[in-house]
Amino acid sequence: MKRLIILSLLTMLVLSASGQKYMTKSGFISFVSHTPMEDIKGDNNQVAGVLDISTGDMVFQILIKSFHFEKTLLEEHFNENYMESEKFPKASFKGKITNLASVDFNKNGSYEVLVEGDLTIRDVAKKMSVKGILEVVTGGVNANAKFTITPEDFNIKIPSVVRENIAKTIEVTVAMKYAPV
């Protein structure tokens, strides 16, 4: 136990000394499925993420059961039938800001960025290239993006009886507020 505490303190010291890593445990991800039959929206504000401003590396992890819906029945179907959250409890993204040189982390402002990496849902990884905005603010960095995914790309099976209720492409919104580690 003593070694674990010392190791944790040393890790925090190294990360703090570099001043290059930013983290959040309360990032926000939502998705919307819009069809003429029904709109389905899931929100998750318990997303953990790390941004390394020296390399542009960006990682976040999502606990699937932390998505919440307006209707309890939708949440149950989402977890049991579509995402199988007992079998696949997490989704993740691991990528890199490809135009990092265009961001001045010493000056408050908004910067357009391109992030490329792998989005993993249900143990299926898919290469993604997403445009977003990094906002450098006093005491942190905010990251925002919108993109679409296709459920079939991640082996999410939609039964034909409800196929008309679920969009073929799902809009995903990401909003992270990072603070220095």
Image (cartoon, rainbow, N blue to C red):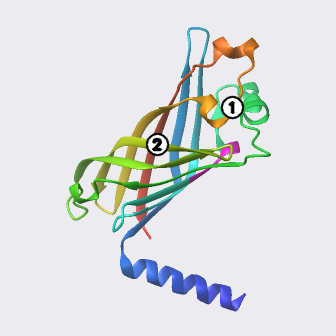
Point out the image quarter for the N terminus: bottom right
Q: Left or right of 99: which side holds 94? A: right
Residue at (65, 14) in percent of width and height:
165
Pointer 1 local density, CA inside 10 Å: few below 14, some 14–19, many at least 20: some
Which residue is more in the foreground, 166 or 154?
154
Q: Which mark is residue 127?
A: none
Task: Please state the horizontal and vertical placement of residue 48, each as a whole percent of the image.
Answer: 55, 56
Residue 103, relative to residue 36: is it above or below?
below
Residue at (38, 49) in percent of width and height:
115
Residue 89, relative to residue 25: is it above or below?
above
Residue at (60, 86) in percent of width and height:
7
Would you identify the image quadrant in which residue 153 lies?
top right
Q: Which residue is mark 1?
A: 156
Q: Left or right of 103: which side holds 52? A: right
Identify the magenta region. 61-65
Point out the image quarter for the C terminus: bottom left
Under circle 1, the secondary element is: loop
